[in-house]
Amino acid sequence: RICFRWKPLPAKGSRKAKARLVCAGFRDPHLALLLRDAPVLSRAGFYVILQFACSYRLALKSGDCKSAFLQGLPDTERPTAIFLRPPTDAISLAAVPEWRSGKIYRLHAPVYGQANAPRQWYMTVKSRLLRLGWVLSKLDPCLFRLVRDKKTVGLLGFHVDDMILVLMPGYDRDEKALADAFEWGSEWEVDDFVFCGRRVCRCPDTSVVTVSQAHYISEMDTLSTKGVVEDAALTAEQISDWRSAIGGLQWVASTSRPDVAADTSLLQKPHSELTGADYAEMAGVIRYLKATPTAGVTIRPIDPEHLTLLSFSDAAWANAPGAKSQAGMLTVAVDGREMNRGTCE
């Protein structure tokens, strides 16, 4: 089938239409034979790139590869060829008239929907970057460093077809080689873009970087507490709403809103234990997010020569329902000189 969606853009209320051919991969006759593991950029790797750009006062750039999976390595894992029957709905046939012929197509490259397509694409990106001289991070399989004269001069991370890049001045040749290695869907965006649902904005004057999810938060459904009884069990409809809401809260809390992480953690319970009070608490957290949609994470410059990492951990004994405990850990980077002067208390 053809899948349609609206992609949000940094400009307020702006978006663009996208369409993608997706095959019925669950009907793949070779499904059990295919390798499918395909990593994506970790949260830690993402923030390492942002901190690098912030501390060295470098521009952040983002681009998306056009029809990425079709650029992947040839599908050579199959014992026999595989074929695809094109979509037959009116919109698809109007967009691609030759599909009216009734032909079926032999697939040579992975397409969206195939179980091994993400892995084939990952292996393609990895091999091309290594060939261009980028070095794979030992901590993140989707984070690459550009090393010159034993010094890291650039970082690149990718999450499927979205890439984020920071590069020191004087390495235009390496940037051009990267641009020529893939086919891109649009011009690279600089210092203000949406990367995997997160709006990244860097102020060139101060180099401060902010990460927020106002667009995602605006689309979260609010929960009506009308008729909710505090001590009563939730209805089937309320449990359905709950599942959707808790998933959204987990994504926001772990990505750009640590201020709701504790509430989100405490709200995660088995459905059999949920009550109207929990439902009302969830509704309150969502209202809070919608009242503060532009809040997020702020990253400030730190002198790389005086970088210090500090880790804090804490635990609350039996503070959660059912006498369960809740723990948390935070790692922060600070300027060692500032800390030594006692200004980071």
Image (cartoon, rainbow, N blue to C red):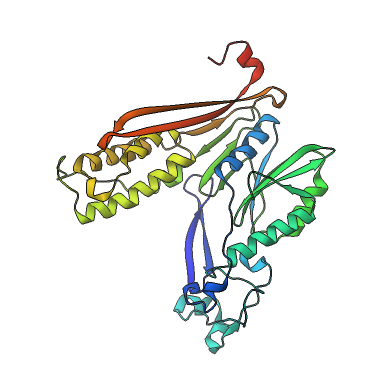
Residue at the image position 62 percent from the left and 10 percent from the top: 341
Residue 152 percent coordinates (x, y): 76, 38
Residue 123 percent coordinates (x, y): 67, 61
331 in relation to 18, above or below: above
Furthest toward the right, the residue is 149
User: Do we see residue 66 in this rendering?
Assistant: no
> What residue is shown at x 48% (from left), y 31% (from top)?
329
Q: As rendered, which of 248 and 184 lies closer to the eye?
A: 248
Residue 307, placed above or below residue 144: above
Q: Quadrant of residue 151?
A: top right
Residue 148 placement: quadrant: top right
Lateral position of residue 18 relative to residue 324, left or right? right
How far across and down, in percent of the image, does residue 172 sit?
A: 80, 45
Q: Inspect this view and state whether residue 156 appears.
A: yes
Relative vertical location of residue 124 with respect to residue 187 in this rendering, above or below: below
Q: Observer-nearest residue: 322 or 338?
A: 322
Residue at the top extreme? 341
Judge by depth and name the residue closer to the eye, 35 or 222: 35
Side of 108 relative to 291 (left or right): right
Residue 55 occupies which quadrant of the picture? top right
Numbered label tally: 0
240 with respect to 69 (left or right): left
Please name the residue shown 33% across and 48% down the image: 245
Expressed as whole percent of the image width and height from the top left, the position of residue 129 reads 74, 54
Look at 27% across and 55% down and name the residue there. Answer: 240
